[in-house]
Image: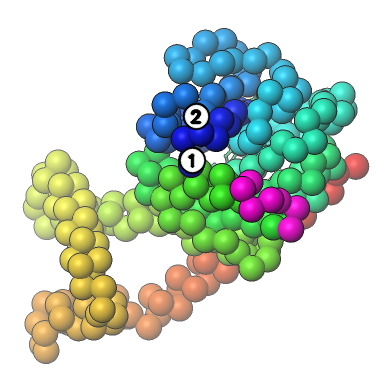
């Protein structure tokens, strides 16, 4: 973001994700170019931010507002909250899972709504954030401001339509749980072979980290080639992968992702009465 551009950023809901966004924004804050406003139940003071009492005050004080409350709390906002936007140019960036742009608009009638799906790795600035909006509703400057902020979270993917946000939810939104599950499985296997639980966790974590770092350096090699590199004929890895049944494993993961995608779609089908 250009240093001369003064911008007020609001965070509505200061739980796990709201705090993570605040932490990334404050880490990347350039001099006095940004002011951060927060509105959350029971949050009165946050060092480095201005706390306001109502979402109306937040929307009218800020240029960009992140919606970081739970979907059920959003649908329960009182009808008077829906008439609160006086500042017509306010950009609303929702991170709420499964709440469509159309439903956000019904409650907060703004033309400038962006729907995103970051993941838990946001805190470490290593998130994958899918996002979608109708770009024609924004000026070039506004889109630049938004992409600068989202890029500071990690990798960003602009999806070709809103439904693809359900697909990104299935892969990178739920993804940290899949990765933790794999690390846990490897650690439990290490324990079953005689390592202490502390050693097992260290071995599993470092194996994942080291393999990731190696794969990133070898970015011209496909993952299939990398797997072959470790799998020598009649060796230990070949025996292990035979037991795993690799083609079944790939098929299973496609079914897993499809299930998560369908659930994300179901959650997006909420009808506001
Ligand atoms: N966690 C993830 O990995 C993840 C990933 C991607 C997207 N998301 C989305 O991020 C959003 C937030 O998730 P989270 O895990 O951060 O939830 P959370 O920890 O429960 O945070 C929500 C915060 O909003 C506050 N709040 C609720 N209703 C409010 C209202 N009417 N006015 C002001 N503040 C209100 C809550 O206060 P109280 O605690 O006092 O109720 C809480 O501090 C959800 O929509 C979720 O779908 C989460």
Asked if residue 115 can be seen in this view, the reply is no
> Which quadrant does the C terminus fall into?
top right
Please name whichever residue, 204 or 133, is drawn nearer the observer in this view of the structure.
133
Please name whichever residue, 91 or 105, is drawn nearer the observer in this view of the structure.
91
> Mark 1 to mark 2: distance in Å?
8 Å
Quickly name the residue at label 1: 2
Asked if residue 37 can be seen in this view, the reply is yes
Residue 200 pos. (x, y %): 15, 49
Q: For the view shown, which residue lies furthest in the top direction?
A: 44
Residue 103 pos. (x, y %): 79, 46
Q: Which residues are magenta?
A: 136-142
107 left or right of 119 in image: right
How many numbered circles are shown? Answer: 2
Q: Quadrant of residue 39?
A: top right
Q: Main secondary structure of the magenta part?
A: helix
Q: Quadrant of residue 240?
A: bottom left
In magenta segment, residue 233: no
Residue 62 pos. (x, y %): 66, 28
Quickly name the residue at label 2: 33
Residue 231 pos. (x, y %): 15, 81
Q: Are marks 1 and 2 in contact (CB under 8 Å)?
A: yes
Q: Is residue 235 above or below residue 69?
A: below
Q: Is residue 142 above or below residue 63?
A: below
Q: For the view shown, which residue lies furthest in the front direction?
A: 4
């Amino acid at each position: 973001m250009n240093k001369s551009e003064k911008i007020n950023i609001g965070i509505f809901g200061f739980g796990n994700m709201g705090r993570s966004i605040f932490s990334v924004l404050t880490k990347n804050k350039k001099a006095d170019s940004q002011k951060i406003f927060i509105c959350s139940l029971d949050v009165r003071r946050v060092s480095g931010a201005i706390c306001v009492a109502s979402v109306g005050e937040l929307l009218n004080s800020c240029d960009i507002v992140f919606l970081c409350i739970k979907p059920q709390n959003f649908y329960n906002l009182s009808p008077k909250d829906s008439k609160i936007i006086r500042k017509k140019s306010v950009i609303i960036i929702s991170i709420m899972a499964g709440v469509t742009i159309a439903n956000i608009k019904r409650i907060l009638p703004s033309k400038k709504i962006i729907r995103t799906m970051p993941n838990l790795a946001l805190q470490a600035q290593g998130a994958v954030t899918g996002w979608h909006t109708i770009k024609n509703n924004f000026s070039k400057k506004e889109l630049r401001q938004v992409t600068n902020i989202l890029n500071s979270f990690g990798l960003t993917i602009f999806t070709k339509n809103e439904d693809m946000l359900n697909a990104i939810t299935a892969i990178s939104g739920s993804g940290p749980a899949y990765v933790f599950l794999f690390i846990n499985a490897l650690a439990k296997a290490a324990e079953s072979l005689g390592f202490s639980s502390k050693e097992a966790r260290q071995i599993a974590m470092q194996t994942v980290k080291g393999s990731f770092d190696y794969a990133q350096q070898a970015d011209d090699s496909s993952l299939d080639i990398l797997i072959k590199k470790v799998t020598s004929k009649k060796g230990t890895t070949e025996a292990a992968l035979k037991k795993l049944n690799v083609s079944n494993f790939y098929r299973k993961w496609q079914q897993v992702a499809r299930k998560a995608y369908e659930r994300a779609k179901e959650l997006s089908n909420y009808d506001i009465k």
